[in-house]
Image (cartoon, helix red, strand yellow):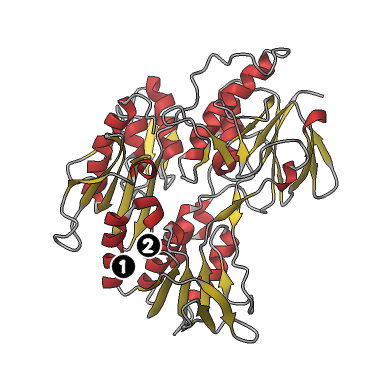
Amino acid sequence: MSARIVVAGAALGGLRAAEQLRATGWTGRITIVGDEPHMPYNRPPLSKEALVGKAPFESLTFTPKASAADVEWRLGTKAVAARLDERAVVLDDGSTLSYDGLVVATGMRPRRLRCPGPLAGRHTVRTLSDARGLRDELTRPGARVVVVGAGFIGCEVAATAVGLGVAEVTVVDPLPLPLLGPLGELLARALLKRHEERGVRFALGAGVTGFEGRHRVRGVALSDGTVLPADVVVESVGSLANTEWLDGNGLDLSDGVLTDEHLRVGGRPDVVAVGDVARFPNARYDGVPRRVEHWSIPADTAKHAAKVLVAHLAGAGAGAGAGTGLAPFAPLPTFWSDQHEFRLQSFGAPVLGLGDVRVLDGDPDGHPDGDVLVGYHAGGRLAGVVALGGRAAASAAARWRARLLKQPALTV
Amino acid sequence: MKVVVDMTKCQDHGQCVFAAPDVFRMDDGGHLAHISDPDDALRDEVEEAADVCPLQAIRIED
């Protein structure tokens, strides 16, 4: 039987890994295993265009490249265990796949609140089926919506719900401002104002202690004693890495899968990780391994990991310590978030520069809907930029991207 | 090579401009413009542009 690479995970990271394996010259078999029944699809619209019905769910499916046409898809099937010493992955249908190379691309799942109360009416937004279920309930006349968690997903869903005509939308978060963690106070304050002006309500500085209602949610009880009436609850309180299937192989799975600077796992040259499950050091920054849940990361990691894995398999016999001939993985992070008519556009690593935030353009206290460009600095040097506003603001941020790319590694 | 951008999907993210600056650019209003019949030598960068489009609005027709 010919050599085979198994890709565990059939979302964007798994698809791009397969395409990049082909682009790098891998002609052996590729088998992709994924627990969802769907071919890989684009997730960002699930909290935005697809939730309002502007993008039909069917339109979100990626079109795989022609080079990946002979990939074997095992959809609706989940990897439940791995024996890396034997190069074998066990699936939930009882079968075992042996491999020459393994790509870990199992991604994340939403964290759920562990509070007493009914489950019906509580939603997360990660999969197509999540978005379908939420859409059905959001569009019921008079629905009162509580979003728990003022992160990117929470803020996007709240904006989308208001856009759909939902009259009562309240965002709950224990922190005093939305998106405070990733963006810092200056932009978080500006965002709060823009959301409130468009009808989103906030219950900040409060945690959720329970859900009220007998058979389905009727209210959300907060730590300050208030109860918010609710027919629909969206839980957007972070995510957990799907790594349980890798237990028992001596790997560091404390937050995703720890990799080296070439995305290799556990010192094994035949196992790489891609996408948001990979916790990798970025040579562009301080070398501290981090998971990055940006949309651009699956493609970036897949490209590098495929080269590393194919080089190893082509030069069979080379040990784990063998050089790859590649520079260490050093992607420039970028993300965006669309909320109401505004876009947040980021380049670089703002979180590394939250202690020194400077306005580069615009006036955050000026026109309430004006464009603002903010720079985040570490040790006096630019770590990242974020624009808030219209298309022109995003383009302005893009002009700083070249500068961030050219900078030598930033050590904080 | 023929490059088709579905302008009903495009939301002017500009990621394609970084990937294939010879083919895509943002005009002064921050909206996308592109060359529809670029030289075949640019195929790799156009494929990269299609990959990184957040809306998957770029199609290459041979």
Image position of A183 with respect to A401: above or below:
below
Q: Measured from the top left, where is residue A279 in percent x and y?
A: 56, 38
Name the quarter where the N terminus of chain B is drawn: top left
The numbered disc on residue A252 is none
Observer able to see residue A55: no
Which residue is tagged 2?
A: A178
In 3D space, how far apart are the residues under numbered discs 1 and 2 (Cα atoms)? 10 Å
Q: Measured from the top left, where is residue B17 in percent x and y?
A: 31, 34
Tag 1 and tag 2 share a subunit? yes
In contact (CB < 8 Å): disc 1 and disc 2 = yes
Q: Which mark is first along the chain, 2 or 1?
A: 2
Q: Measured from the top left, where is residue A408 in percent x and y?
A: 34, 24
Image position of B17 with respect to A276: above or below:
above
Camera-side residue of A118 and B24: A118
Q: Chain of mark 1?
A: A
Q: Quadrant of residue A126?
A: bottom right
Disc 2 marks a residue whose amino acid type is Pro
Q: Residue at x 53, y 57 (%)?
A: A238
Image position of B11 with respect to A260: above or below:
below
Q: Chain of mark 2?
A: A
> Circle 2: is it few (<14), some (14-19), or many (20+) Cα within 10 Å?
many
> Circle 1: is it few (<14), some (14-19), or many (20+) Cα within 10 Å?
some
Camera-side residue of A388 and A32: A388
Q: Quadrant of residue A257?
A: top right
A5 vs B54, left or right, is right
- Callout in the foreground (1, 2): 2
User: The residue tagged with tag 2: helix, strand or loop?
Assistant: loop
The numbered disc on residue A195 is 1
Q: Residue at x 27, y 65 (%)?
A: A194
Disc 1 marks a residue whose amino acid type is His
Q: Quadrant of residue A119?
A: bottom right
